[in-house]
Amino acid sequence: MENTDLAYGDVVLVSWGFEDVRGTVREVYGPPARRHVVVLLTPELSGDIVDEPSTVSVPFDAVTKVASVA
Amino acid sequence: MPSFAKSEWDTSATARLEELEQLHVDARGSSRGRRWGTEQLNRSLFLVLVAQFQTYSRDLHDEAVEVHVGQANPYQAAVLRKLLTQGRKLDTGNPRTDALENDFGRLGFKLLPALREAEARVAGRLERLDVLVDFRNLVSHGNETALPSFIVSNDIEPTLTSYRTYRRTVNSLIATMDRVVAGQLAFGLHMSRPW
């Protein structure tokens, strides 16, 4: 699924280095050429790669949408 | 050449602030003299000023992160980006000095001491930044009980004159931040200044 229209709550894959983890979009910000995404990671969705909710900020193109918010 | 973040500050952010400032002129006229009925508009100016400074600070941090990431291989890049932005205070909180110190500290240098060392007047500007952000919080949270005493205790009030003073402070601070962050990255990563 392409991430041309990321929205708050969408589930995305974020590169964690050697593998990807799942998180949810908290915010999309920045001008079009430099858009970034704040992704919320939770223990449940990320497969316990974080032990408490935490955010990361990555360039828009560095995430892949896997599910739209309901 | 400034950072992309500062270019945005100089253009988009400035345009947003000037649009709101023009509303003030349109509402009350441009002639000298005391203005009435503009307090809420003046409060809005402070809110937007802090919002635009937060945007600048986060954009600058993003840009600095990408400078670091640009030195790594693709796998290391993802790990590095995660380490430099995980739990970043500028993503969830106000751009107070402690947030700036925390977030930019991940890049490998202490921002506040570097800023103070760069220019003597920065120390006072940093103090005024925290006053500005605290004032913004009282306004945006509708804390009318605490506002009067805060105004008395600090050199800030919901007037156009006070707003302009703080806008100059933020403008000067941004110019120094832009220069210092570029210099620190160049020094730490043994490269030419990224902007």
Image (cartoon, coloured by chain):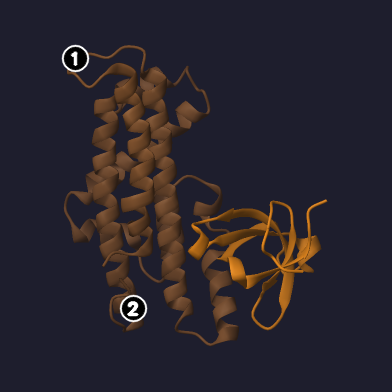
Chain colours: A orange, B brown
Please tell me which residue lies in front, B4 or A45.
B4
Would residue A29 appear left or right of B164 to someone viewing this image? right
Res. B183 in view: yes
| Residue displayed at 50% across by 56% down | A30
**Chain under callout 2:** B
Q: Are marks 2 and 1 on the same chain?
A: yes
Hey, which quadrant is residue A22 in on the image? bottom right
Res. B131 in view: no
Check disc 1: other Cα within 10 Å, few if <14, some if 14-19, many if 20+. few
Hey, which quadrant is residue B165 in on the image? top left
Hey, which quadrant is residue B24 in on the image? top left
Tell me the number on the disc at residue B188.
2
Would residue B155 appear left or right of B20 to someone viewing this image? left
Q: Is residue B81 depicted above or below A57 in this figure?
A: below
| Residue displayed at 70% across by 65% down | A50
Q: Is residue A47 depicted above or below B102 in this figure?
A: below
- Name the image quarter holding the N terminus of chain B: bottom left
Q: Kindly check if marks 2 and 1 are in contact, taking CB atoms under 8 A apart as contact.
A: no
Residue at image mark 1: B33
Task: Indicate the position of residue B145 as horizontal and vertical percent values.
Answer: 47, 17
Identity, as a three-letter code, of the amino acid under mark 1: Gly
Q: Is residue B25 depicted above or below B187 in this figure?
A: above
Identity, as a three-letter code, of the amino acid under mark 2: Gly
| Pointer 2 or 1: first along the chain | 1
Task: Indicate the position of residue B83 as horizontal and vertical percent values.
Answer: 55, 70
- Name the image quarter holding the C terminus of chain B: bottom left
Secondary structure of residue under mark 1? loop
